[in-house]
Amino acid sequence: MSNPPTDRRMTQPDRRRRGRRASDQRIATSKFPPASRNFSQLKAACSQCTLHEICLPAGVDMLDLARIDQLTQKRMRVLRHQALYKAGDPFHSVYAVRAGFFKTEGGTGDGRDQITGFQMAGELIGLDGISSGRHACSAVALEDSEVCIIPFNEMEALARAVPALQRSLHRLMSREMVQDHKLLALLGSGTAEERITAFLVDLSRRLSQRGYAASEFVLRMTREEIGRHLGLTLETVSRTLSRLQRQGTIRVQQRLVRIIDPKALSDKVPA
């Protein structure tokens, strides 16, 4: 029986393949501390962040996971009222909110600024720049925050090599489009009360998904900013919140909101 080939007798392509396998193995073992090398433990550690759909898509082995993990290593602090990026800036990356709260806003063509959304920990921002190569809106921190910077070209290239990551990206982009469609429909035909209740129910649901209390939370945005998001005046937002409080559906104390009757609140949201 012949002996297995040694490195000296291996062809150059064989040596390259062996080198890549050894490199991948080093990444997989050195990237994570001993307590995190177990895949289920790593999933549990990220369970409060919806970014796990990119960082930990289903069906990914440890070697691919290590490659995905490299995408989210660079982080950035963004102070309150500071812009992460501005409308018109060149698009290079998408950002995963690790902590804090953001608003995204852009011009409407008639000189007004429309707030297109509010993003919390575990959500992605920056997808607006994919189509044109420039950001269509600005992202501003509502409180001191932290983001993961994910270079889009690298993420796109890796998604082609890791089908599970590609499917996760498609789901996230589809979800963004669905949310935009719902907001447009609400702005087009919803009453002030329907818009406010839909906003509160959606905020409660998203907080609950991250392990926070669904029935009591602090609004990180002002009433004016809520109005600019929902196409309402500051006065209308304040009056509607007061009316919902008189009805016994919610209780409002400055920015603290308590949902007293979740079912009654949900019933007010258009189907």
Image: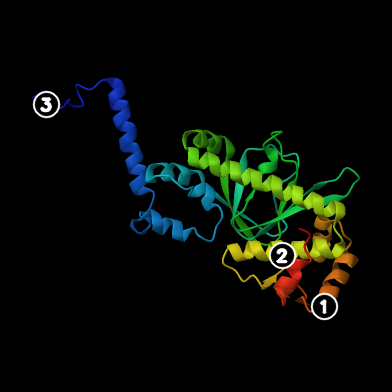
Q: Is residue 74 among the parts visible in the rendering?
A: no
Q: Nearer the viewer, residue 199 or 117?
A: 199
Judged from the image, the secondary structure of the residue bearing numbered disc 1 is: loop
73 versus 245 height, above or below:
above
Residue 70 as seen in the image, left or right of residue 20: right
Q: CA distance from mark 1 to mark 2?
A: 16 Å
Going from N to C along the chain, the mark reached first, 1 or 2, is 2
**Callout in the foreground (2, 3):** 2
Residue 98 drawn at (x, y percent): 57, 56
Q: Where does residue 118 sit, x and y in percent of width and height?
A: 71, 56
Q: Which residue is mark 3?
A: 3
Q: Quadrant of the N terminus?
A: top left
Element type where label 3 sits in the image = loop
Q: At x 49% / y 37%, what residue is drawn?
A: 163
Looking at the rendered structure, the kind of residue marked 2 is: Val
Please say whether residue 49 is visible from this viewpoint.
yes
Q: Residue at x 67, y 73 (%)?
A: 215
Residue type, numbered disc 3: Asn
Q: Mark on residue 201?
A: 2
Q: Is residue 118 left or right of residue 75?
A: right
Which badge, 1 or 3, comes first in the chain's sequence? Answer: 3
* Mark 2 and mark 3 residues within 8 Å of each other at the beta carbon: no
Which labelled disc corresponds to residue 247? Answer: 1
Q: Of tags 1 and 3, which is closer to the observer?
A: 1
